[in-house]
Amino acid sequence: MRKWRAVLLLTAAGVGFAVSFVMLREAIGTDSPWLCLFLMFCILGMGKIAEPLFLLRMPGSLRPIRAWERSGTVYRGLGVKAFGRLLRSTPLHDLNRQVYLSRQRADAQHVMRLVESAEASHFWAALPLLPGIAITLATGQFLTATVLILVQVFFNLYPILHLRLVRERLGRYVVAAGRKRRFPAVGNVAA
């Protein structure tokens, strides 16, 4: 029964987003860069609503965590770790509580899949914003382009980088937890 409810919710959201898109297009015109922004938010919403049915994935070539990402130096320099602290220490963490380990979500592998799905949602949501940025720059709408670039950076780029960092840390945790289960410490072995 839960699956049917999830399908119904996803369908209703899809129809609602489509109708809203058409209405917005009629109100502001088909050549408005703000349609790209609206589409970005629709993709983020649909990705989240679809989670009970399927999890989005990053494209194959972008999925692996690179060695330079594992070192953390670049991310630290870009302020990605500070961005993560900001997310955790403010009500922003309520936007996606599923990407945090807790007593209710102790399965690190499942949380890692949810983290990758959130990362993929931001990746796919970033794509429709790119033409909007290009068009506004090409037509000299520099204030609009600046707003769209800031949205892209803080709503997509930094969340992607932060989620990649989280996925890498969770991956290390999963590997370490697996080792502990296979080779229990001497003090934990039943006599």
Image (cartoon, rainbow, N blue to C red):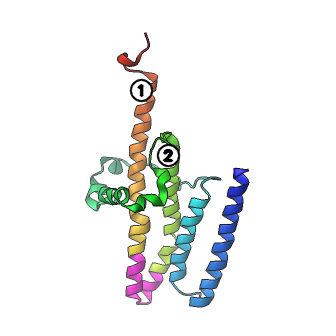
Seen at 67% across and 62% down, the residue is 9
Report the span colored magenta.
Answer: 134-149
Q: Specify whether residue 109 is in view.
A: yes
Q: Can you give x and y, in whole percent of width and height, for residue 17 in the image?
A: 63, 73
Q: Can you give x and y, in whole percent of width and height, for residue 62 in the image?
A: 47, 55
**Which numbered disc, 1 or 2, marks the residue that appears first in the sequence?**
2
Q: Is residue 85 magenta?
A: no
Seen at 55% across and 54% down, the residue is 57
For mark 1, what is the residue? 180
- Residue at the extreme top: 191
Amino acid residing under circle 2:
Val
Seen at 44% across and 37% down, the residue is 174
Q: Is residue 13 above or below residue 171?
A: below
How far apart are the two marked residues, 1 and 2, measured between alpha carbons? Answer: 19 Å
Q: Is residue 25 above or below residue 100?
A: below
Seen at 50% across and 41% down, the residue is 109
Left or right of residue 15: residue 160: left
Question: What is the secondary structure assignment of the residue under circle 2?
Answer: helix
Q: Are marks 1 and 2 in contact (CB under 8 Å)?
A: no
For mark 2, what is the residue? 111
* Quadrant of the image containing the C terminus: top left
Q: Can you give x and y, in whole percent of width and height, for residue 164 in the image?
A: 41, 53
Left or right of residue 117: residue 72: left
Q: Specify whether residue 63 is in view.
A: no
Tell me the crowding category of disc 2: few under 14, some 14 to 19, or many 20 or more residues within 10 angstroms, Cα based: some
